[in-house]
Image (spheres, grey):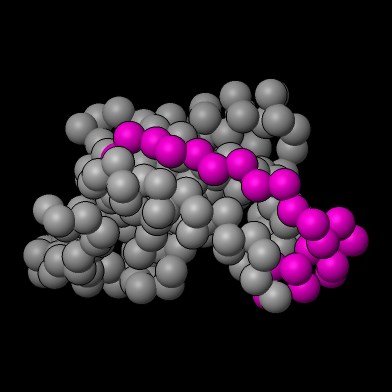
């Protein structure tokens, strides 16, 4: 569970408790059973500084559908939660194991999630000229490929990465093993 744009100390405490509690839901226990994991979870909660990304998304370092050795990237404008939650049809990219472009398909990204001033997020309309425009340049794709290489050298093959670009800086937001097909 992710809680975005927490604004006060009291909200941080409440958000941490909510994330910890999410590990004890029936659906979370059932998921652990299907993976053969202990039903009693050990929960670590990460508190990160909120950034305001220009674009964000997910990257699989192996194709999660067929296991082939390619990077699969989905991207949209604003916060990556719009991709993760299925609120938009994201841009889709595939890179080979050396970072070469295999395919690029523009999505239909008509909204962007942004931080709300009072906390949480708001949906914002994307300008018409950006709805079907690619959010990632070739240089950004190369930087994502480099991030994948670095993460795999440290954590091993087959990763699910959440990332964001803000003001030209690439941020790694989350890194975990691919645990299921999307």
The residue lying at 50 percent from left, 53 percent from top is: 17
State which region is magenta: 27-50
Q: Looking at this view, is 127 or 161 the one in front?
A: 161
The residue lying at 27 percent from left, 68 percent from top is: 109
- Going by the image, does 38 lie left or right of 80? right
Q: Quadrant of the C terminus?
A: bottom right
Above or below, 170 against 23 in this view is above
Q: Looking at this view, is 17 or 172 the one in front?
A: 17
Instruction: Residue 153: give x, y in percent of width and height.
Output: 69, 24
- Would you say residue 157 is visible in this rendering? yes
Above or below, 13 against 107 in this view is above
91 inside magenta stretch: no
- Would you say residue 135 is visible in this rendering? no
The residue lying at 72 percent from left, 47 percent from top is: 42
The residue lying at 24 percent from left, 61 percent from top is: 121
Instruction: Residue 18: give x, y in percent of width and height.
Output: 49, 59
- Going by the image, does 172 lie left or right of 153? left
- Going by the image, does 149 lie left or right of 104? right
Task: Name the outermost residue toward the right.
Answer: 36
Instruction: Residue 155: give x, y in percent of width and height.
Output: 70, 30
* Dominant secondary structure (helix, strand or loop) of the stretch shown in magenta: loop
- Going by the image, does 90 lie left or right of 36? left
Q: For residue 107, what is the image quadrant?
A: bottom left
How many dots with numbers?
Answer: 0
């Amino acid at each position: 569970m992710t809680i975005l744009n927490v604004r006060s100390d009291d909200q941080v405490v409440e958000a941490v408790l909510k994330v910890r509690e999410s590990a004890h839901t029936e659906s979370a226990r059932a998921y652990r059973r299907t993976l053969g994991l202990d039903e009693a979870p050990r929960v670590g909660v990460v508190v990160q500084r909120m950034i305001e990304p220009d674009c964000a998304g997910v990257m699989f370092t192996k194709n999660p559908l067929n296991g082939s050795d390619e990077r699969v990237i989905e991207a949209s404008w604003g916060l990556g939660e719009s991709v993760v939650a299925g609120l938009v049809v994201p841009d889709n990219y595939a890179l080979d194991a050396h970072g070469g472009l295999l395919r690029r398909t523009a999505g239909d990204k008509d909204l962007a999630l942004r931080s709300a001033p009072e906390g949480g997020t708001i949906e914002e309309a994307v300008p018409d000229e950006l709805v079907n425009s690619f959010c990632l340049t070739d240089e950004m794709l190369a930087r994502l490929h480099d991030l994948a290489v670095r993460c795999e050298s440290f954590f091993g093959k087959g990763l699910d990465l959440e990332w964001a670009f803000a003001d030209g800086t690439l941020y790694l937001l989350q890194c975990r093993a691919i645990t299921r097909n999307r």
